[in-house]
Image (cartoon, rainbow, N blue to C red):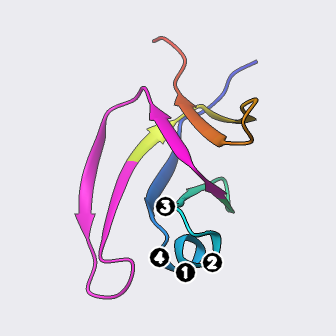
């Protein structure tokens, strides 16, 4: 299998955080958005400032993103890339 690195970005999601009563993050990758509690990012990223909301996002390239649920119910997004 040959996975091509795909652009992703993540940012703090205020509406989801207010609704849940705790901080939430949005992870956008491969034309989908996932709301998670925590992000483990093992690839290089850079910040991007937008004129509209979300004002600041972190962007990078990844081969795959794993969304997992911990025992306590916390959703975690692990962003990885295949070795070159």
Q: CA distance from mark 1 to mark 4?
A: 4 Å
Q: Nearer the viewer, mark 4 or mark 2?
A: 2
Residue pictured at 42% horizontal, 26% vertical: 42
Q: Which residues are magenta?
A: 35-59
Marks 4 and 3, how far apart at CA = 8 Å
Q: Position of residue 78 (x, y in %)?
A: 57, 32
Give SS at disc 3. Answer: loop
Farthest residue to the top: give it.
83
**Residue at (54%, 78%) from the top-left corner?**
18
Q: Where does the image place residue 66, in percent across and percent down from the top left? A: 68, 33
Main secondary structure type of the part rendered in magenta:
strand
Which mark, residue 15? 1
Q: Are marks 3 and 1 in contact (CB under 8 Å)?
A: no
Say which of 75 and 45 sits in front: 75
Mark 4 lies on residue? 14
Which residue is the site of mark 3? 23
- Mark number displayed over residue 59: none
Position of 54 with respect to 35 (left or right) is: left
Determine the CA span between mark 3 and mark 2. Answer: 10 Å
Q: In this rendering, is residue 25 above or below 56? A: above
Q: Mark 2 highlights which residue?
A: 19
Label 2, residues with CA under 10 Å away: few <14, some 14-19, many ≥20: few
Given contact means CB atoms under 8 Å apart, are the residues at marks 1 and 2 in contact?
yes
The Cα–Cα distance between marks 3 and 1, rounded to whole angstroms, is 10 Å
Instruction: State which quarter of the image contains the N terminus.
Output: top right
Residue 70 lies, in percent from the top left, at 72, 31
- 17 up-or-down from 11: above or below: below
């Amino acid at each position: 299998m040959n996975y091509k690195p795909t652009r992703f970005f993540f940012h703090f999601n205020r509406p989801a955080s207010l609704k849940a009563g705790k901080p939430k993050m949005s992870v956008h990758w491969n034309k989908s958005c996932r709301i998670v509690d925590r992000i483990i990012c093992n690839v290089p990223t850079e910040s991007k400032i937008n004129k509209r909301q979300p004002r600041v996002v972190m962007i990078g390239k990844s081969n795959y993103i794993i969304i997992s649920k911990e025992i306590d119910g916390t959703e975690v997004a692990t962003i990885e890339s295949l070795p070159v």
